[in-house]
Amino acid sequence: MQSWWKLYFILLVECSAGSFYDDPDQVLLPSGPDSDNELHRKWDFEDSPFDIGIIGAPFDTATPFRGFNPRRGLNPYTSPYTILDCGDIPITPFDNALALRQMSEAFLELGSRTPALNQGDDHSPKPKLLTLGGDHSIALPALRALNKIYGGPIAVMHFDAHLDTWHPAKYPSPWESAQSDFNHGSMFWIASNEGLILNGSSAHAGLRTRLSGEGWDDFVDDERQGFMRILSDDIDDLGTKGIIDKIVDRIGVETLTYLSIDIDVIDPGLCPGTGTPEPGGWTSRELIRIIRGLQSLNVVGADIVEVAPAYDGMGEQTALTAAQLGFEILTSWVGRGLGQKAEAEQGKVGNIGRKRDEL
């Protein structure tokens, strides 16, 4: 222990005397019997000549962090907007009704606060929340909070392999109750019946789900709730641009919108870390390209859900993709806000010196 602290102190003294970056030849490590013996033990094999050597360099503390998004020309983390890690909502795992209330109150509390920077957008005077789930049922408390914050229903842009507009009866429970009605496949049905979703302006994308029963009842129920359906296979005919255009035409660029991304919209061969995988999904590149193309939407809240680390691959590709999607959402929010502020400033400058035309 004493030798370790002695080495630590010597390093501090050596480093304080001058920077390695000022003098690359500066000797930082102390010389002495211990260090010399260690080097000899490792490298004293002059009597073993070789032509090809394999050597390890277990050093990775010089890896950089890059936050600049070239497709938008900005770094959301160094923009005028304050991005805050709000931590986790304290949620009980033992009582779904109580958990729903806890989430609803948290979303309402945080979403009602005054933003750090005036965004100059009359339709979005409150801070935006990006929620990292969690299963997909968290969209219901988020929509309940947004309904109170904005005073009415909003559109939902839903990326998923599944409809999630199922009647609760499609999820039978041996203990039927109001709590059992609330699950990760019925939350949009509940939200629609509560008047939280702007029917006629909402859309699903990436669908490839099986249906319940013997017919088309699920689609009929979905249409009654006002959703447009874009199937996973549609990308083969429309391409990413066609998908983007179809969504923007459906929702518009001014409609208040909640963006909900279930990671199972991506093929499980690329994102296996989810609870209800469905083969035949989009690639991560395709989904990222579509999300980038939707930056004109007036998104006031978003979530990325159904990421299950226990089922992820060795490379944690599902988590990496989810993180990239979150980065794209943050970048689009900042870019849209900065664009609106620039337009507002140009409008102010353009009006200077103009006389009002009184008729």
Image: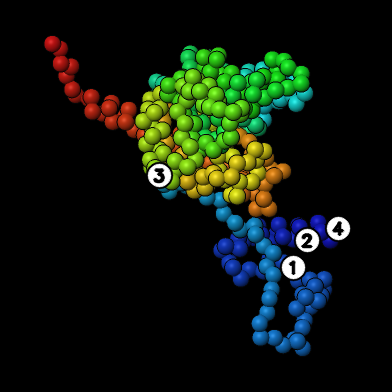
Disc 3: which residue: 237
Between marks 1 and 2, how big is the CA–CA gap? 8 Å
Q: What secondary structure is marked by label 4?
A: helix
Q: CA distance from mark 2 to mark 3?
A: 66 Å
Q: Which residue is the extreme one toward the right?
A: 1
The CA span between labels 4 and 2 is 9 Å
In the rendered view, tell whether residue 284 sits above or below residue 123: below
Q: Tell me if mark 3 has few (under 14), some (14-19) or many (20+) residues whose alpha carbon lies within 10 angstroms of its own.
A: few
Residue 359, x across and y down, in percent: 13, 11
Q: Are marks 1 and 2 in contact (CB under 8 Å)?
A: yes
The residue singled out by tag 4 in the image is 2
Circle 2 SS class: helix
Residue 250: x, y in percent?
39, 28
The amino acid type, in three-letter code, at marker 4 is Gln
Quarter location, residue 28 = bottom right
Residue occupied by mark 2: 7
